[in-house]
Amino acid sequence: MTSVVFVHGTGVRAKSYEKSFARVMSGLGRVRADVRVARCFWGEEHGASLGLGGASLPVRTKNRGVGGDGALDEDDPLAVWALLEVDPLAELREFAQAAKARRGAGARAGFAPGRQDPWQVVADRARGLSLEAATGGGGSLDELVSDLAPHLGAAGGRVAQEISRALGGTPPADGIEAIAARAVYALAVQRAEGPHTDEEPLAVDGADRDTVVGALTDQLGGAGRGGFVAGAAKGVAVRALNTYLSPLSSLAHTFRGGITKGAVPASGDILRYQVRGAGVRAAIRAAVRDAVEAGDGPVVLLAHSLGGIACVDLLAEPDPPAGVELLVTVGSQAPFLYELDALTALRRDEPLPDAFPRWINVYDERDLLGFVGEKVFPGRVTDLRVNTRQPFPRAHTSYFAHQRLYDLLAPELPK
């Protein structure tokens, strides 16, 4: 029986590894029930941590920062999602400002006595949202619904509160339903991931996200849910970047300790691997050995991000583990590090060893941490492009929620 050893990437700890492992098992099980999926979890033992409790962080003494200037492409739906990742209510607030501007320009304000404010109707619908209409498809969609369902009520309540506060008493305006649905979804995702989480972000395929948002839009009474009101995002993007994203902003300065500690698993694992990577490679070698003994068949290494770098390093060593017939790297930086001459076991002027197995490299063009290998290792790597329809950085963590990935891999896995 073919064994697929799943090697995780940077920043992953036990809880998120088990979720990703379950996704891989479900995805491969749908297309290749004849394969066995095996674990290779190295994050707990070989991942990074602040061993002195953050003693290296300076104490904040002055609230001083400079906002950077920048712009998102407001005509790109993923730019709107990138904005909502930072501030789920940004689009809704911009909509409310536009509505108040229309009132200031002479539009009729107020409503007849006894008539319910139409914004209150929308707010009430937001409080009563459910995800029943989005369930039943199975696979990654049902997993997303399961992740979001416990947080939908609080997210809908927060959006309803904002609608009542910011829009109550203003004239009716079209387009609120889709904007409110996106805000509810973004808030639910934010709550599902939790504050200061040291786990990976939720893995979400763009198609599943759109299905959930579409179901919420329908319940709010909206139509044409596939489109974005690009104008609602105009002017907000730069402010969001200045407030939230600039590394020199006062907000980042204020919360430096929490930001740094939260970033340690992801960035620290990479730094630690560069000087302590032997432990990670030994864990992968042991997982391959166990898979060969348990499955008595070919082994596939399915490796994400930093895990792909470690697998390339391991398989390029003079004594690579026996039994690996296929390497699949997903969102990997291995070709990039080779071009930088930064791989551990392979210098930039050296070819892949003759014994190196067949290599498939999966990437998403939106993933800024995913690189291609066909031109780096001509004739030795096959690049496969997927489109999770997610902005970065979520594009880097959503591969295994993307059903198309498994369809592409199914015919490639040895039998």
Image (spheres, rainbow, N blue to C red):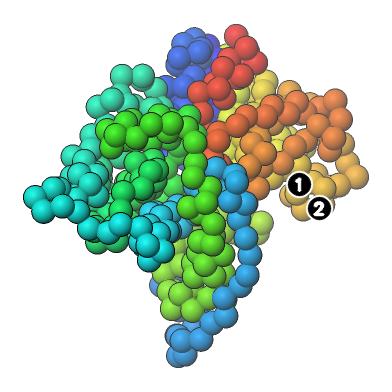
In the figure, is residue 207 to the left or right of 129? right
Residue farthest along the bottom direction in this orientation: 61
Whether residue 87 is visible to the viewer of this picture, yes or no, is no
Q: Position of residue 343 (x, y in %)?
A: 75, 49
Q: Tag 1, which secondary structure?
A: helix
Q: Quadrant of the C terminus?
A: top right
Residue at 39% of width from left, 22% of height from top?
139
Q: Position of residue 355 (x, y in %)?
A: 79, 26
206 and 49: which one is in front?
Answer: 206
Residue farthest along the left direction in this orientation: 114
**Relative to residue 46, is residue 70 depicted above or below?**
below
Query: Which label number is shown at residue 96?
Result: none
Residue on which the image places disc 2: 340
Residue on which the image places disc 1: 336
**Relative to residue 175, is residue 167 depicted above or below?**
below
The reply to whether dot 1 and dot 2 touch (C-beta < 8 Å) is yes
Residue at 70% of width from left, 38% of height from top?
312
Kind of residue at disc 1: Phe
214 and 270: which one is in front?
Answer: 214
Q: Position of residue 232 (x, y in %)?
A: 48, 52
Residue farthest along the right direction in this orientation: 349
